[in-house]
Image: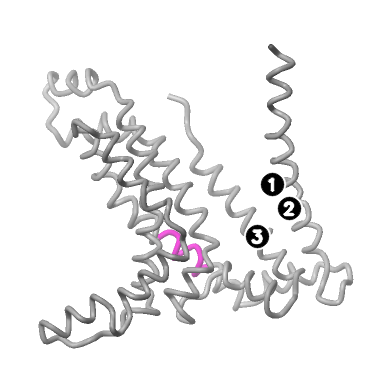
Amino acid sequence: MKNRSSFFSVPYILWILLFVIAPVILLFYQSFFDIHGQVTLANYKTFFSSWTYLRMSFSSVLYAGIITLATLVISYPTALFLTQLKHKQLWIMLIVLPTWVNLLLKAYAFMGIFGQQGGINSFLSFIGIGPQQMLFTDFAFIFVAAYIELPFMILPIFNALDDIDYNVINASRDLGATEFQAFTTVIFPLSLNGVRAGVQSVFIPSLSLFMLTRLIGGNRVITLGTAIEQHFLTTQNWGMGSTIGVVLILTMIIIMSLTKEKNK
């Protein structure tokens, strides 16, 4: 039995080695070369001394934070409401369904919705307000990113809330706790691991978004993800692109350590 389990673990180990560990090692290795192929630390010096890259870093963290906060504000009451429903698993499946649609297709769909001839501007024209510039704005980028990331926040929070023993909640109410007190002292603390997992699932991917920044945010939204894309595909400065990638990886590790699940 042990040999069989070891045999079936081989594909998993190979996957981790080839598609996780090897790319990260290659990224670290490439970050020490400049555009001319010379070994140097200039890429890291440029990144941490350039106001442009520091501003991109701040923008990336700020946008990721806003997207995470927006999804959390929507997801927590939604997940709490879903746990009260009779067919909650069905509703969860309906929430997950949009994640099966290709990200590019969803981005183009929102480009049509927010465009000058899109549904929202058509409605604004109908009521007499007139078309507004909605595409290529910060609002459009945050709205679309939050919509796409929403299921990844709802699922872990829902699972955490669904695992709570309602006898504990009822006991707190029997002891005189109000609904608000029961939520703040029992429900929310017991669901914190789900919140942490949701924050990880949303904040980390949001740090490196580049497709949505191009299609929805236009040139108004500049993040480290777009900088990596620019260096790898346009300027061909793979060393600088790898350096930014390394900084993102280290940032993600820090976020994961700060939001890691705590044992009950």
The quarter of the picture where the C terminus appears is top left
Q: Which residue position is annotated with label 2?
A: 23
Tag 1: residue type? Val
Residue range (magenta):
58-65
Q: Earlier in the sequence, mark 2 or mark 3?
A: 2
> CA–CA distance between discs 3 and 1?
16 Å
* Residue 107 belongs to the span the image colors magenta: no
Q: Under tag 3, what secondary structure?
A: helix
Relative depth, front residue between 26 and 99 = 99
Q: What is the quadrant of residue 16 in the picture?
A: top right
From this view, report whether residue 197 is shown above or below residue 216: above
Q: Are marks 2 and 3 in contact (CB under 8 Å)?
A: no
The residue at 59%/54% (across/down) is 251
The residue at 56%/42% (across/down) is 257
The residue at 51%/38% (across/down) is 260
Query: Label 3: few (<14), some or many (≥20) within 10 Å?
Result: some
Predominant secondary structure, magenta span: helix
Tag 2: residue type? Pro
The nearer-to-camera label among 2 and 3 is 2
Residue 185, percent from left and from top: 25, 31
Q: Under tag 1, what secondary structure?
A: helix
Relative depth, front residue between 199 and 16 = 16
Residue 56, percent from left and from top: 55, 72
Q: Earlier in the sequence, mark 3 or mark 1?
A: 1
Q: Under tag 2, what secondary structure?
A: helix
Residue 35, percent from left and from top: 81, 76
* Residue 61 belongs to the span the image colors magenta: yes
Relative depth, front residue between 212 and 255 = 212
Q: Which residue position is annotated with label 3?
A: 247
Q: Mark number for residue 20? A: 1
> CA–CA distance between discs 2 and 1?
6 Å
> CA–CA distance between discs 2 and 3?
15 Å
